[in-house]
């Protein structure tokens, strides 16, 4: 029996596994909706938010942020982070995402739309740009598309 799945208020029509992966090696999916729209999302996001019933965007956000917060909280314990180090860790994460967003925006997007760009899209853009630059100037690849070095 086939059950209709929804992500938020949108009915899922089809899902295709993409060739590229997240920086941690997880699958990426191309999700097509009944309304004709589509998006690329991580498999983890899809599995977390794909439900057999319609939900609101607020409900989706609550589920997603709750899961991410619990995962990060667990990671803090795994690395035995001290109370005095917590703010520095979150600032470093914020700096990495801001840096990646700025680079991706400069490469591809109009800056007015940057708040809606998924982080995996940013990484996809940076990885492709890094490969393009490597091909043109011979610079070796350093891994993921996000560059943590300050080159100003």
Image (tube, rainbow, N blue to C red):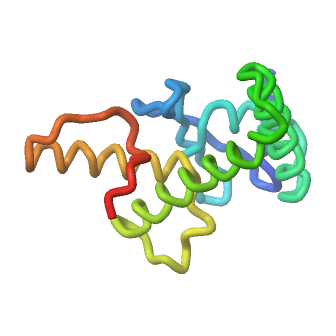
| Res. 77 image quadrant | top right
Q: Residue furthest front?
A: 84
Residue closer to the observer: 149 or 59 = 149
Nearer-the-camera pick, 147 or 71: 147
Q: Is residue 34 above or below residue 105?
A: above
Spot the residue most to the left: 137
Quadrant position of the N terminus in the picture: top right
The residue shown at (40%, 61%) is 103
Position of residue 150 measured from the top left corner of the image (x, y, whole percent): 39, 55
Picture quarter containing residue 15? Answer: top right
Q: Is residue 140 left or right of residue 99?
A: left
Expressed as whole percent of the image width and height from the top left, the position of residue 4 reads 79, 37
Q: Residue at x 80, y 32 (%)?
A: 82
Question: Which quadrant, please, contains the C terminus?
Answer: bottom left
The answer to whether 143 appears left or right of 14 in the picture is left
Residue 40: image location, x then y, percent: 54, 46
Is residue 4 among what the camera can see?
A: no
Number of marks drawn: 0
Q: Nearer the viewer, residue 2 or 147?
A: 147
Residue at figure coordinates x 30%, y 34% from the top left: 142
In the depicted structure, whether residue 31 falls above or below residue 106: above
């Amino acid at each position: 029996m086939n059950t209709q799945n929804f992500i938020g208020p949108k009915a899922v029509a089809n899902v295709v596994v993409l060739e590229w992966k997240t920086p941690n090696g997880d699958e990426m999916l191309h999700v097509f909706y009944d309304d004709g729209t589509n998006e690329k999302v991580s498999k983890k996001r899809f599995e977390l938010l794909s439900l057999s019933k319609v939900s609101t965007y607020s409900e989706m956000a609550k589920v997603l942020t709750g899961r991410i917060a619990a995962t990060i909280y667990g990671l803090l314990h795994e690395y035995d982070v001290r109370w005095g180090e917590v703010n520095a860790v979150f600032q470093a994460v914020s700096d990495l995402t801001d840096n990646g967003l700025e680079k991706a925006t400069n490469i591809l997007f109009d800056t007015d739309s940057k708040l809606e760009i998924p982080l995996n899209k940013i990484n996809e853009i940076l990885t492709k740009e890094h490969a393009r630059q490597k091909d043109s100037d011979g610079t070796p690849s350093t891994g993921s598309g996000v560059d943590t070095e300050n080159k100003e």
